[in-house]
Amino acid sequence: MRAHEIPAPEETPPAGRRSLAGTDELLVIKQTEHPGEPAVLHRYDAPAGSRPRPVPGTEGMWQTAATGVPDQDKAVRRAFQRVHTLGRYFGADEIGPGADALIVQSRRDQAHKAVFAGAEFCGSRHRLHIKGARKLTGSADEAGRVELVSGVCLFSHRNLRFIDEQGHCTELLRADAAPPAARLRSIVMDDELSLYEYETVMRQSRMIGDVAALLPSSLALTVTVDVPRVQYYLYLLDAFQSGLVAAELTQHYFRLVDDRYSRVLDLFCRHIRRALAAAGRPDVTVRVAPGLDPLAECLWEAVTTGRIPRDDDLLALMIAAGDPMWKELRELDVPRSRQCLGYTSYLVELLRAAGLSDDSKGALPINVDSFGEALLFDEARQLRERLGAPEDGLPPLGIYAAETVQTLRPDGHAASLYLTDPGRYAVDEDGACVDLFHLIDALYAQPPGLI
């Protein structure tokens, strides 16, 4: 939807908002059950009590105050302890607990609850889920260098749609997606970036800047930006191989992916460099992960000729590209299929950062990403042990900031912005239109229009 098609949005934060980037408010967007109706933005103040309270209108989401932590449940207490440990490890007195913690129950596994503890940095607020903090000893000053890895996916389920010959929309942009029920006839893409892409870029670039500001200026820092491109080609290969999509439409999809990749990568790198400069670290190396780039020419040719390479041939091309991590993972039977190639490319970057390549010895690996990618961190940590990580190596650290706005399905359960992207515009509880891009700009103290 274009901006001129809707009423003028709210562009400035309410009066009285504190000057720190971020907010004490919990921002929740709930989808309606009626297609075409805008989602509704709700704002909730941080609770005053330490007893977890349900967030109104949600299923499996609670808030609790940071005060009185010893009386709270163990998961919340540990989450705030990790914030404290993070500050102590970096020697940063300016890291402190935020106003609240957010507790989110998994829709699929109700026994699992993720806790995001409020954390205040010098100039920013986040709600953080931290991994690896229990093994942190000593100080970050002991590292030879810091290798930080961050990424953002392309599109969102709302932003790119595959339409079959019966006029039905089919979802393909996920690893567990079912094949199309009928032959695909068209692909519809919104030219404007998705809210998922924009929010992720803004949130994670700010988090990267906050981490950089904690590090001694003498400590070398490399930021690896891992934005998928060829990984997205793979989503359509099975349908092409099964005769469910024509070669011309497949190539059109590849071009859409390439164009979107360039836009998202450019936006992410620009905001990362802005955040690093604001942190006093304009000298930091920003590296772009190669991903599955060695397969691009091969897959374009395969669609042209109709002959898709075997899984082992694709893997051999990745190994031949020269990154030793691919060969080592192959010896561990990873990846096991073509569908696993993209997932493995993300693991490669986390393992490289963890000091398992010659140029990263003595590195402190830090993964700054969305919480949905935390499973990658866990698997990389397990693979690191299987690959014989050096005993004196620094433990990997994962920092996952909760999304700026929590998005809900119509049934009230939380889902990521990637899966539940409401679009750029919502309405507040009074029915006023809110430009969510501008809202995010305001929270992160950025002028609007930097897309």
Image (tube, rainbow, N blue to C red):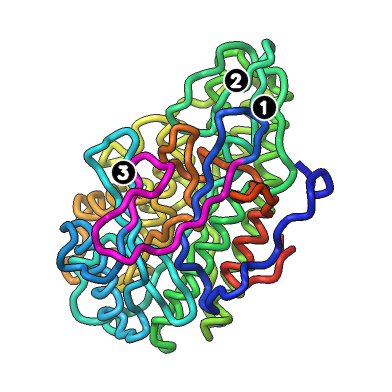
Q: Position of residue 372 (x, y in %)?
A: 40, 47
In this rendering, would 417 be left or right of 371?
right
Q: Amino acid at mark 3?
A: Gln
Q: Is residue 359 located in the magenta-colored stretch of the structure? A: no
Of helix, strand and loop, which one carries label 1?
A: helix
Q: Which segment is the magenta one?
A: 39-63
Which mark lies nearer to you, 3 or 2?
Answer: 3
Of helix, strand and loop, which one carries label 3?
A: strand
Going from N to C along the chain, the mark reached first, 3 or 2, is 3
Calculate the distance from the C-alpha at mark 3 to the C-alpha at mark 2.
Answer: 37 Å
The residue that mark 3 highlights is 105
* Residue ID at (40%, 35%): 340
Calculate the distance from the C-alpha at mark 1 to the C-alpha at mark 3.
Answer: 38 Å
The residue nearer to you, when weighing 349 against 140, is 140
**Quarter containing the C terminus:** bottom right
Which mark lies nearer to you, 1 or 3?
Answer: 3
Q: Are marks 1 and 2 in contact (CB under 8 Å)?
A: yes
* Residue ID at (67%, 27%): 250
The residue that mark 2 highlights is 240
Of helix, strand and loop, which one carries label 2?
A: helix
Q: Which mark is residue 250?
A: 1
Is residue 357 something that shows in the picture?
Answer: no
